[in-house]
Every structure is written in structure tokens, then in C-alpha cells.
Image: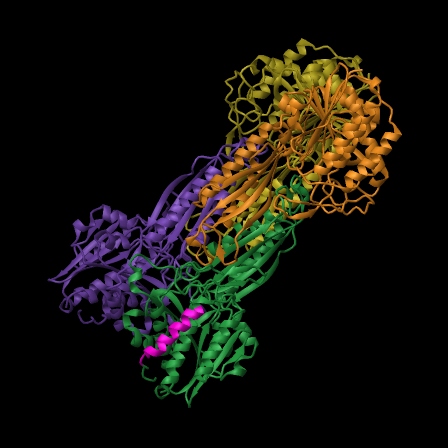
Chain colours: A green, B yellow, C orange, D purple
């Protein structure tokens, strides 16, 4: 493992500007054209040979003699959230949803800090080539929020464009004090599946239920029955969540509709639990349709977030490097699993190589005095700019160096 | 149609004693040994050639020259109810349920009045042979309360023991003023089905629901889902009732049982509705088991009350005769259908002949001043003895004569 | 009662054209401007002193000496249905829903036949003043489909604009053979109530149900619980329907929404049952919210269709007149109650006077050979033009004359 | 910490006989008279001054100069299970349930191994007084299976009978290989609450649901609604179980009963979660009764198992001592929390002192070749006698010595 590289204030200052620019110009998932251009420009300046991959994704490579090939992934998309931080560099941008609706956009999940930290880390490594050896692969992934981006990059033959890495590293900003790190070996986040369920019935006048197969009543019984998947069918010690996020059906209060629709969001913590939960949901949906004398509902998979599995062997190694850089007390390497989801896991799983993924904080510690600050996806999410750029750079650099040669 | 036969006070007085004796000695369904002996004795005295039929049932025949063959059916069983009327001839008898339990018994449904009125009517006809012609067949049926008696008499080849009738008449006492009659053409009462549903699951420790297929939760979802049969699947204008009368399951609060059981009582108003309701119930039970990943429940038919269908052609004829005897204002020939059940209908339906069945009152009209008196199955059910014997005799006689020759 | 007035073929021919014109130009509820102008023109030609009332409603009066004051009401609005009859006079018109959406419109409920028959009947009476005496009041009511029109006319002081009648008559076309009539004394149609129920919860991320009060799950339990109102709480012999016609909630499958909404359509057959059903629904909604730890839902009354109560005394009189005109076998004066709804009843109930309302057929009898033709609210609803104008005129005239003086 | 005491084969041999005797003579909870006599005899022989406490409980004290006071608790009751092990010392005993029913009994939960190990450990300490100093307090607790015993001993002023300890130790046999240990700091087992819920309604004939408040339907909706406590109201990462173990209601299929009853068994992992879950259950029960228009159900607490909380500070210390004795690889000090329950925790919590509780194995390792052997509460539960006595003695001795002085 190479020795640490000292922080370079000039590099940090420059990337603070990069951060402000990215923050002010968020783009929605799979539409990150401007963002990709910005990244490409910086990678070219670093001599990292940028290439597009997976639509608006970008990959770059920094070779530095023999040694390990280490991939570092940063996701780059913003969210349809109207920023309400009051920051001087706050976003006023808009984007278009897939259905064409124009909506305000914001880097409400902090992917701008991920891009900035990755570029800043890379700039430090380029400026300190004597301090390490091997190859650093940079993966700027679009569309994390929709789980589409990692799949798109793999479909675009990412491993043909860059050297095949031995490990994938990645980080996500969290509402923690500057320099604090949370991670854990094994399953770090939840697997997530989203389905659209179309419930079939037969319409009739509202006064003639016997002429109908009432799809809204059917959907209601489905939803009450789905509660048993978590309450009775899964091991109480293995978390699972089955949420009905949306429902719609019927056009007029006095007409029984011919169909209704709801969407499911399903969180599980490992593949075994996932298969069990999905199969039980499907069984219940089909049986409840049968109870109504209706055909089985149409189930459409909207997206699937893969597992986010940290190497049991290498996570402690990376944790040790982070602790050495940021302080033992700031680094929690056995944090609780989070029930949120990420699609970074597809890269390492595609190759069968290890991954280490962690959360880092960039907030002023004093801001916790009055409670935890607003978290990701909030219109008020606002890590402190200088802190988050510095902390993200340090964490990325320490982790990457722990896996490269010296 | 023959002219009416005047009431004979001596016959009425004699049958008032019969009534007191029967009332004091009720017997449970299909155990009416003493009752059958009493009936047999009276039929012998009338020269009606009594024969046992269907266990504790009795049939008799009174022939009187050429003419129609008219059957009159009276049911004879008591109920496991502890009499609380305070009458001098109140029952203190007990009987044994099928499981051996000894219970108080009472003619709480008034079948003692049915026997008495039938015997009294027959005595009047025997004493007035000049007033009619044809054949009167008397059917004293056991076990009406369990719907077992009519089936038992048919299984015992009743039509081999007596002349095959052209019509079946019958009556039931009700809490109406003396001499009041309610009936209706078509379906007069509900069809009733009772089922025992055994829900199958798999047991486990109460802390390990994921190792079980929880039968009590399954039963609960079945019961909530069964509500839709009446609320959504039947025509709102065609009454139906699905009642879960009993439920049981589990031995210990911290153990998930392997099975649970509930009983259903299902009321419908005609065969078409019955088939629809039963098939929907079965569909829901099977689907809810499937939703639990369990085998289909075991459904055992406990009993089935048939339709009680009054001839649209002949009911108005009988109603006219009753009105002539009891007064136009006392007879309602278009009364509401009742959701209770009766098994008399099997006799006429077995032969494909018409039936007319009606309710008659034997209460003191003054007793309605403070509200409707206690009805059937109540420990307080108490028509007035002289009134109910007289009213039952008159109604039976008017109806029977309307169908015999003169 | 006056003698009948013979049909005048010239009047019928003229009104066939009126019918074609109205059918081709339907207007949505409370927007019947053109229709009102057409009606006004015809009333002026009849000397009936037309006046606007209740927005797009029109009233007229034809005085003919001393005698009873009889009101005849016809409703005039079309429906947002795209006509698919292929008739030469089919509608291609459009209208705007309250929310501004442009939609195809059609006289899919046959109110064009009601206007035409009323005008044709009035023309016959004006042409035959020697045949009757008294006052005929004509009420052309807008907005029947939304139950808004009768209320609007009453709010606009209708009884100040026209002589106060002694009876209100009215008719509705049905898919019956020409000249057939269905009606019944007492409650002829259902009372209907429509509610919008807004279910309150608290939003959260889809992976954190414990931070939420999930409104969609709450709504699902409300809907399954509402089934018991019909299945367990109402008298099985008294029809009631509780339909959830629409439901909506949530914007994103992985977010638990803060609220959900559904609409109820409730059918009952008399005021007592209505109060019982509504109070039970409200009780269940509030209790289910409490079960979720949520505030009671917001319940907004969308509209209320009043009772449609036919005079027990006068309905047989009108039925007799209709039978005399159309044939005994064509007139069913004891038809089943219909579970649909009408707002005509407000007029008579406002004054405490009797009402008689009936359904009449205008289809070719031969069209029933292959099953019942399409009914109201269908895009295929199409009584035969000459038949329906003739039948509506005859029925209206016979009924009106039965209540006027001679 | 004192050095270990070598195992004494003569002591082990003697206690193998004790074990056989106890195993053949199990007694039900709070009826352990013979068991208490046996324990008392052995304690007297050890000079441990036995005293009864809490009915059939026994306490003893072994003083050995100045030093820590350490309590070791063993539970002593058997279960109403019919033994099916085929062992030569298998139980053929019977006992009486609280309701008087005679049932077969078995040490199916292995409390006989707990008694034996405690006595054997004490015998080793008495025989090796030079090896330790301080005071060993022995608590032989009755009625663990019903959570009644620890409460009874505290109610009987246990701390007046023995020196007040500084720590409570305890162990439970599990189906693990001989010498294997599982434990964890913090909450080691679930809190358990059992309730009897009596649902109130109003009875009626099965054909007249509108005259009833149907308690079985009400109970069914309660049970389906209770699923949401686990599925929607608790943190998915904090296990909870709500089991309906029994249900009963109704006597006859065609009668709607006046009440129904079910029992709940509720597992939670800490006090906060317990309070949340219990309050949500109560809220749902009351609201569902309100939804039925019924009074709130009667809730009777059957029993409550307290937390079983291992000292975060001292558990690693005890784990280290166990690992030193039994091997690092055999001792898992970070095992998963178990959802079963124990009432040992009341002792330490009553004093506010630390507790360490662990599971130990006594099975032949070879017996795991074909899958995990039968666990506790099974009629086949059978650790190997010599192994389980030896393993229990070693674990108890190592743990106790780690807390005593040297």
C-alpha cells in the first residue's frame, strides 16, 4: 500500500469551483449531456483518455506503470427536486421527465460531490505519480437513481473500453459530519425491485356490482393480503419491506372500472430473501385475482436495484486505510445495513471481483447541534462546500491508494 | 271444494290436552320416540293406519272415497332450549345432543302446535266424512330443525307407504295474533346450507411465523374476503347471507397451529342464487388458501335446507280458502319472503307436485299492545294454548278442504 | 278524467325532426344553452310562455280554464359518451367537462326523447283544448345526470315562475319494446350519494414505512372493511350498494405518499336505509383511520340523488290510464325497483305533493329477438326514432290527461 | 480472575446419575416439589445452606472469603410434552395443567441439564476452594416456561435470603455440538407478551346479521389489520412478531355469537420496540371494534417475558473465559439475537446489575452430519448425557470463575 498523498490546496480550490458549477447545473438520469462534457474536459486535462460509455456515462484511465488495476465509480445524475437551500450556487435548472413534463432539478442526492471528489482524487494522483503504481480506472456512471446507468454501461461493453479492474471502489455522501465514514462488510444496502401491477376486472354501472369484477376492491384485498409477506412469511430477523407506492383506478365515482393499477417497491437484504419475497408476492397477487374470479394481474418489472455487496475480505483493509487518514473515531466499519438501494454493485458482480462502497460526511459538525441536517432527496440537502470536497477527496484517495501498488 | 266443517268444541278440548302433553315432553331431532308413540295412538284411534317412516316419523292415511289425494305435513321435534315461560305445562325435560351432552329441551319452535293442529284437523274430517271426499295423507316428520327428517322419510321410501299425493300442504306457527296468516307464492323461505371449513396450515413456534403456514391468519383473510360474496357478487335485490357462526383454532397462545376450523351458514332465496353463492364461496376459500401457499381447505357439508317453494297457481286458491275462514283482513297472501329455512319442500319437489305452506298466529291479539311477543327459538315463546289449537285447526282444515273433493 | 286525444301524424312527423336535431346536438349537464333555445322556441310557438329557470332550464305553462294544475317534467342533458350507433343523425358534438377537458357528447341516456315527447304531448294538448281543462306546467330540467338541475331550479324559485302544481309526472325511456311501460308505487329508484374520501397519512421513503402513516394501505383496509356495510349491517332484504368507483394516491413507486383519495357511490332504497348506510360508512372510515393512527379522512359530498317516490294512491290511477292507452299486457305497474337514480323527486317532495314516474320503451320489438338491446349510457343506445317519439308522446299524453280535468 | 479448575471425573460421574434421575422425573412449572427436594439435598451436602424461595424455587450460598458475590441461575421446570426419545432414562411421568388436565411431562427444554450443570459446577468449586475467593450464590428458579418463576422469587424477597450479587450468570442448553457456545452482548432474546383478547358483539340468528354485531367477522378484521404492525409500523431492521395463537367463538353454525376470543403472542427485541408494538396493537383492536360499532375488546395480559439483556461490558469478558476453556473456534460471542424468550433477566434488572447469559451445546458433533438434531420443546430433544453434563459444567465453571476473585 502506498503512503498517503498530502492534500493540495490548489487542487481543492479548483475543484470547489467544479463543484459549484456541477451543483448549479444538475441533469436528470440518462440525460447528463452537459455533465458528461464537463467530466470529459477534466479527464482530458488529466490525460485520462475519456470515452463515452452507456449513453451519457464517461470512463477514463490513468496508467502509472505495473501494479493493480483499481476502478473508482462515481454516479452523476440529479433529481427532479426543486432546490430550496438558498445557497449562492443553488440550482434553478429544469429537466424533462420521460413523459415530457418539465420539472425543476437538483443535485439533491449529492452526486455532484461524487464527481468532484473523483476528479479531485484523480488530480492528486496525477500530480503525485511517484506515490503509487498501477492503473486507476474512473467510471462516471449516469442514471443511478433509476438503476439504469450501470446496466447501460455494461450493455455498452464497458470492459472493452477500459482495463478490467481487480476491485471496484465507490462512495456516497451522507448527512454525517465532515470526514466521518460508515460502511460494513457484506450486504451494505437493500436490493430493490419495483413492479407495476395491473389488476384486471370487468366494468359495470356502480349500482350493479354483480355484473362486474370490481378491480378496486380486488386491489384493496391484494394490498391487505400483501401485508402478510412481511408479517408472517419472512424471517423476522431478516428485514424486508413491501410498499405500495401508487395506486389508481376508475374514472367516475358511479362506474365500476375494468382495471386498476398499483406499483410496488420491494426491499430485501440478500438474494435468498429477495427470491422468497418476490415469489410470495406473486403468489398472493395471483391468488387474490383468482378469489375475485379475475385473470391474474399483469406484473411489469419497472426496475431492479442489485445487491450492493462489500467484500468481507477487503472492506476491513479499506476501512483501516480510511481510519488512518480520517481518524479511528470517525470511521465505523460495522455500521447498520441501509434499506436504501444502489446500482453500483453490478460492476463488481459482473466480473466476480470484490467491491468496497462507503458513505462519507461533508457537513459542518456544528450543524448537528440542533439535530440531524436534511438528508438526501430533500430540497434542503446541503453539505458544506469546502468540507464536502475536502472530505470526499481524502476518502477517495485513501481508499484508492490502499488498493494500488506503491 | 267442499263446504267448511264447523269447529267441534269437544274435539278442540281433547286436543288442548294433547297439546299440553306434547309441550311438556319435547324431544330432540330424530329422537322423537315418545312423540311418535303419542301420534301413533291418536292415528290408530282415527283409523288412519299409522306406520313408522324415517326413524321416528309417522305417516297415516284417511281414505274417503274417490277424489284428490292431499298430503298434510307436520314436523314434530323440539329444541335444546331451556323453557322459561312459567306456563303450568312448561317443559322440564332434557335430551342428549349427538355428542352425548345432556341439555334442557323445549318446543321452542312450536312444533307441538303443528302436531296438535294436524290431529285435530284430522279428527274433524273423520267426524265429518260427508263433507269431503278423496284421501288425506298425514306426514308427521321428525328432525326439521336439522333438515334431516324429510330426507330420512324420503330415504325410507315414504311414497311406498302412503298414496302418492297431488299436493303437499303445511303450516308453521308464528308470533302473530290468533287467526292471522302470512304466506306468499314462489320462494317462501330461504334455502340454507351449512358447511364446516377446515383450514390447513403448518404449525411452528409462535416466534417463527416464517416456518409456519399460519391457519388462523389464513382463516381471517378468508372471512374478510367472503364479505364480498354478498357485497359485490350477488344482485343487491336478491337477498343472500353468509354467516360464519363458529371458529376455532390453536391450543396455545405461543404456538402457531397446524389447522383452524370455521362453520358457515349460507342463506339464499332460490336455486340460481344458491349455486352462485356457493360457487363463489368455494372459489374464495380455495384462492385464499392458495394465497397462503396452503392446500385447499376441507369443506364438509353439514346440512342443506331445500327451497320452500309455494305453487304460484295454487297458493292464491289456498289463500282464498283461508281468507274465507279467517277473514280477508287477517290473511296476507303476499307477505315478505322469510330468510329462515324449512325442509318441508323436499316432499313436493321429490314428486314434482305443488306445495302450499303458510304461517299462522295463535297469540292473544292484546299481547301485541306492548310490542311483538317472543318469537320461535326463544325460551319465552308462548302462543296462548286455546287460541293456537283453535287457529291451527281452522287453518289446516280450511286449506285441506280447499284441495279435497266434495 | 278526459277522454284520450288521438295521435296527430303531422305533429308526430314534426317532432321526429325535433328529435333528430336534439339527438345530433347533445350538451353536457348545466351547459344546455342550445337545447334551451330550441325548447324555448317550441314553447313560444305553443303559447306556453317559456321562462328560463335554474340556468339552462326552461319552464312553460299552458292554461286551459279551471281545473287541476299538472306538472310534467323532462330532463334535457347529454353525456360525455362517444356515440357509436352509426345512425344518420348520430352526434359528433363535443363538450367540456368542469375541468376544461373537451370530450365527445351523446344523448346516451335518451333525454332527447324526453324533450321531444314532452313537446309533442304539449302540441297535442294545445291542438285539442276542447278535450281537457286545467293547467299544464312543463318543466324542462337541466343537469339530471349530476343531480344538480332540480336543485338549481328550486334554488331559482321555480314555484314563483309557474303555477304550483298538484302532482308531478315524468318519464324515462328504457330499453323496452315500443309502448311497454314499467313503474311501481313507492320507491321506484335508488337514492344515491357520492362522496370523495381523502385519506390522510404521512409520507416517507418507501424503505421506511415506520416513518410513515401509509395512506394507501389505510385506504385498502377501509375498502375491505366497507364490504361489511352491505354484507353484515344492512337487512339482506333491503338492497344497498357501496361502490368505490375511483382511487388514486402516490406519485412514485418508492415513496410513501402523504394522502390517497377514493370516491364512493352509495345506493339505498329509502331514507331509513340511506341514513343507516351512510352512518355506518362514516363510522368505518373514521375507525380505520384511527386504526392507522391517522386523522379522520376528509369526506366531501359530491352529490346526492334524492328519492324517486311514486304516490301509492295515484300510481295505480296513472297505470290504469297507460294500460288503457297502450294495452294491459304492455304495462307493468308492479315492476322491480331499479337501483339507478333520478333527481326528479325533489320537485314533488319540495311541495309535499304526489309524483308518478315511469319508464317507457321505444325499441322495435323485433330487436329483442337476439337479446336485450344496449341500454342507457352505452355508446350503442338507440331506440328507433319513429317508435320512441310515438310511444313517448302517447305515454305522456295518457298520463297527463288522467290527472287533468275534462 | 482465578485459574481454571480441572474437571473431576468422579464429580461428573456422580452428576450424570443426578441428570438421569432429574430427566426421568420432570415436573410442570411451579409444581417442582420433587425437583426442589433433590436440589435441596445436594446443596445441603455441599454446605450451601439451601432455602426455599418463590414456592418451589431453591437458593443456596457458598461463601469462600472476601471477594465478589456472583449469582448463577438455573431454571428447573419441565414441559407438557410426551417424551419420544427412546432413551433408557426417558420420562414416563405426568403432571396436571392449571385446569386439572393430566398430561405427560418431559424435560423437553433441557432444564435438567441446567440443574445438573449448576450442581456439578458448585461441587467442583467446593472441592477446590483454594482456587477462588468470594461468594457463589445459586438460584434454582421454578416456572421459567410461564415467566412466573423469577417474578415469584422476587416477590418472595430473594435478596433478603441471599447475599446481593454483583452479577447474574446463566446458561441454556441448545442443539449445538458439545462445548459450543453462542451469546451476544445487549438484547440476547426477545421480550414476549401474551394477551387474551375478548371481542364483544351482539348475537342474532344467522340469517339476521343486521340484528347482530358479528364478533367473528370483527375478529377477522382485527387479525388482518394487526398484520400492519409488523409490516408497516415497525422499523424493518428491528424484528417483531405478532402471532394469533388461538381463536374461538360461536357455538352453532346458524347463530351469530355474542363474543369471540383470541390470544396474541408478541415478540419484540427491546423495551422501546415493545412499547411501540403493544400500543399499536391496542390502538388497532380498539379501532376495529369501533369500526364494528362494538365496545372495545377486553384485553387480559396472560404473561410477560422480560428482556434478556447481556452486559455490553462484561459479556466479552465471560466470552473470553469460555473461549479459553472451550476453544476460540467453539465460542461465538456475536451470535444472532434469538426470538425466543427467557425470564432470567428480571434478577439483574431488579438490582440494576449486569447479566451474562449464553447457550451451550451438549450434542455429539457427529449427530449434525445429517442435519440439525431436534431442538427444545420437541419430544425428540436429546443431548448426549455425558457430553451435556461435562459441557454444562465446564461452561458454568469457566464463566463463574471469570467473575470471582482468585
Say which of D371 and C389 sits in front: C389
Say which of B394 and D32 sits in front: B394
Residue B387: image location, x then y, percent:
62, 14
Is residue C212 highlighted in magenta? no
Say which of B333 and C133 sits in front: C133
Name which quarter of the figure residue C319 lies in.
top right
Q: Residue furthest left?
A: D65
Q: Judge left or right: residue A107 versus residue C395.
A: left
Residue D11: image location, x then y, percent:
23, 66
Q: Residue furthest right?
A: C9
Q: Quadrant of the C terminus of chain D?
A: bottom left
Residue occupying image coordinates x 81% and y 23%: C125
Predominant secondary structure, magenta span = helix
Q: Residue furthest bottom?
A: A65
Say which of C18 and D378 sits in front: C18
Residue A208: image location, x then y, percent:
67, 40
Residue B141: image location, x then y, percent:
67, 28
Marker count (numbered) = 0
Q: Judge left or right: residue C12 versus residue B55.
A: right
Name which quarter of the figure residue A11 lies in.
bottom left
Determine if residue D307 is in view.
Answer: yes
Magenta residue span: A6-22
Determine if residue A346 is in view.
Answer: no
Q: Quadrant of the N terminus of chain D?
A: bottom left
Q: Judge left or right: residue C130 versus residue A177.
A: right
Amino acid at each position: 500500500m502506498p503512503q498517503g498523498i498530502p492534500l493540495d490546496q490548489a487542487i481543492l480550490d479548483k475543484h470547489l469551483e467544479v463543484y459549484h458549477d456541477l451543483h448549479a447545473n444538475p441533469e436528470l438520469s440518462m440525460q447528463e449531456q452537459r455533465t458528461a462534457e464537463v467530466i470529459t474536459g477534466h479527464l482530458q486535462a488529466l490525460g485520462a483518455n475519456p470515452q463515452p460509455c452507456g449513453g451519457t456515462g464517461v470512463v477514463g484511465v490513468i496508467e502509472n506503470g505495473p501494479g493493480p488495476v483499481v476502478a473508482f465509480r462515481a454516479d452523476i445524475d440529479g433529481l427532479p427536486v426543486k432546490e430550496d437551500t438558498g445557497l449562492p450556487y443553488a440550482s434553478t435548472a429544469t429537466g424533462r421527465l420521460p413523459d415530457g413534463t418539465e420539472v425543476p432539478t437538483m443535485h439533491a442526492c449529492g452526486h455532484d460531490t461524487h464527481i468532484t471528489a473523483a476528479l479531485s482524487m484523480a488530480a492528486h494522483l496525477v500530480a503525485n505519480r511517484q506515490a503509487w503504481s498501477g492503473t486507476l480506472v474512473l467510471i462516471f456512471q449516469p442514471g443511478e437513481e433509476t438503476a439504469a446507468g450501470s446496466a447501460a454501461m455494461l450493455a455498452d461493453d464497458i470492459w472493452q473500453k477500459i482495463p478490467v479492474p481487480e476491485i471496484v471502489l465507490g462512495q456516497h455522501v451522507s448527512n454525517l459530519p465532515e470526514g466521518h465514514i460508515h460502511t460494513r462488510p457484506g450486504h451494505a444496502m437493500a436490493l430493490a425491485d419495483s413492479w407495476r401491477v395491473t389488476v384486471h376486472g370487468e366494468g359495470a354501472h356502480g349500482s350493479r356490482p354483480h355484473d362486474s369484477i370490481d378491480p378496486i376492491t380486488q386491489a384493496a384485498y391484494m394490498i391487505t393480503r400483501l401485508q402478510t409477506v412481511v408479517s408472517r412469511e419472512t424471517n423476522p430477523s431478516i428485514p424486508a419491506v413491501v410498499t405500495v407506492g401508487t395506486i389508481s383506478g376508475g374514472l367516475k365515482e358511479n362506474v365500476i372500472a375494468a382495471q386498476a393499477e398499483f406499483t410496488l417497491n420491494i426491499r430485501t437484504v440478500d438474494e435468498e430473501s429477495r427470491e422468497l419475497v418476490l415469489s410470495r408476492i406473486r403468489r398472493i397477487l395471483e391468488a387474490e385475482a383468482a378469489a375475485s374470479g379475475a385473470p391474474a394481474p399483469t406484473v411489469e418489472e419497472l426496475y431492479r436495484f442489485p445487491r450492493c455487496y462489500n467484500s468481507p475480505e477487503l472492506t476491513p483493509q479499506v476501512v483501516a486505510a480510511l481510519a488512518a487518514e480520517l481518524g479511528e473515531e470517525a470511521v465505523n466499519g460495522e455500521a447498520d445495513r441501509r434499506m436504501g438501494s444502489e446500482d453500483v454493485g453490478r460492476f463488481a458482480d459482473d466480473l466476480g471481483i470484490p467491491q468496497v462502497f462507503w458513505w462519507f460526511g461533508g457537513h459542518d459538525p456544528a450543524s448537528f447541534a440542533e439535530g440531524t441536517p436534511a438528508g438526501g432527496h430533500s430540497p434542503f440537502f446541503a453539505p458544506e462546500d469546502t468540507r464536502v470536497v475536502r472530505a470526499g477527496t481524502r476518502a477517495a484517495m485513501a481508499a484508492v491508494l490502499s488498493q494500488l501498488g506503491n
